[in-house]
Amino acid sequence: MTLFWSLYVIAALPALFEKTQAQRRAWHPVLWLMPVFFVVMAFREAGGDYSRYLYLFTIVEFMPFGEAIGMAEPLYALVNFVSAGLGLGMAGVNAVCAVVFLYGLYRLAIDEPRPLLVVALAVPYLIIVVAIGYTRQGTAIGLFMLALTQLRRDRPVRYLLLIFLAAGFHTSALIALPLAYFGVRRRPGILNLVQKVGAIGASIGFSLTIASDRLSDYSQFYLESNRYVSQGALIRSLLTAAAGLIFFVVRRSWSRSFGDTHVWNVLALTSLAAVPLSLVQSTATDRVGLFLLPFQILVFERLTVMPASRQVRQLLVAAVLAIYALNLLVWLHFGEFATVLWLPFKNTVLGTFP
């Protein structure tokens, strides 16, 4: 527990005193936090799905390439195969995935007025639970965050390419494909509309074709089985839905300040829809809802820069950090799986933490 709280504190304290940056900087001080997260993520021997990943690695290690690539999503299987061939072990796989995730988080953060706050808010759940616990999906979300930086610049083709790469680690990333249409600024012209619809339709059709077996596995695993129930899914979806409501309340101010409401409209609506869905299919909704975490984080981060009063802005920063600290407290000390799958936290470089 001490390690996880330390990760949050070293990010939250500088975020508490962070000054709003007027323009994007290619090299931000938040970069210095990344090596710390990398060591924790790359050399771990714990986490929600770690035993399953280790089992997969031991199988792939002795397979020919053609068979190995079919054992999981192709890019994740490829990383396992190469790491085994180089003798890097599971740490090699985790290191590659950690770099991809952290790069996506860094690129998303440095576009924001408060990059340190973005990273701090990512620690309690996006980093500790998702990136450490669910490596494949965490890596996919890292690429999704990178894709969002392209969508905000009206680059739908680059966005699509990054989503396809994300699907190479976790097929659930394909759910983000429609954003390539809905998340770009509207331009006049029926031809432009036809091109967009055609491109997205072709992308979805192609994705469903190549990933049909994997999607079928997920359907059976998450939707058809009564065995898997995600504890706390409703609470997590409520926090994301709160971000969605805040977005719609401050939408005009958001548009004036940031000019990118077109990117977030669909995600805000999806965050609201996730609440009733979590009552029906908690695990499936929870896993898909992980792709809403970057939206949730950015809403609370941007909320702290909108008020004119400096005192109010500072109070909001403290309040948001307290809310996310509470989130970590509940999951870490009262959660069903934290003490079983994450603790004690074993790391080949840092040692074991109770």
Image (tube, rainbow, N blue to C red):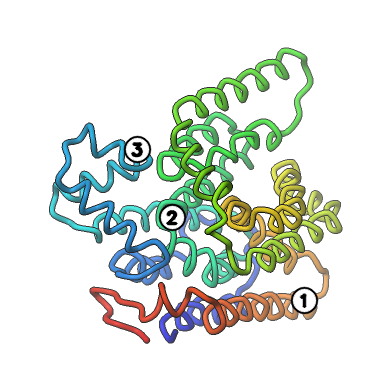
Regarding mark 2 in the picture, which secondary structure is present there?
Answer: helix
Dot label at residue 101:
2
**Percent position of residue 181, x then y:** 67, 30
Q: Is residue 17 visible?
A: no
Camera-side mark, 3 or 1:
3
- Against 244, is 180 above or below? above
Q: Is residue 181 left or right of residue 207?
A: right
Left or right: where 108 falls relative to 52: right
Query: Which residue appears at 50% of the width and 44% of the height?
Result: 218
Residue, disc 3: 74
Q: Residue at 81% across / 59% down in the picture?
A: 245
Report the Cα–Cα distance between label 3 and label 1: 49 Å
The residue at the far top in this view is 191
**Are circles 1 and 2 on residues that touch, CB within 8 Å?**
no
Location of mark 1 (residue): 310
Q: Where residue 83 sits in the image (x, y, percent)?
A: 20, 50
Q: Is residue 32 above or below residue 314?
A: above
Foreground pick, 282 / 240: 282
Secondary structure, mark 3, is helix
Classed neighbour count for the residue bearing mark 2: other residues with Cα under 10 Å, few (<14), some (14–19), many (≥20): many
Tell me if 165 is positioned left or right of 151 in this view.
left
Q: How far is mark 1 from mark 2, CA to CA?
A: 33 Å
Residue for point 43% across, 55% down: 101
The mark nearer the N terminus, 1 or 2, is: 2
Image quadrant for the N terminus?
A: bottom left
Q: Residues within 10 Å of mark 1 (few under 14, many from 20)?
A: few
Residue 213, picture quadrant? top left
Q: Three-letter amino acid code at disc 2? A: Phe
Q: Are marks 3 and 1 in contact (CB under 8 Å)?
A: no
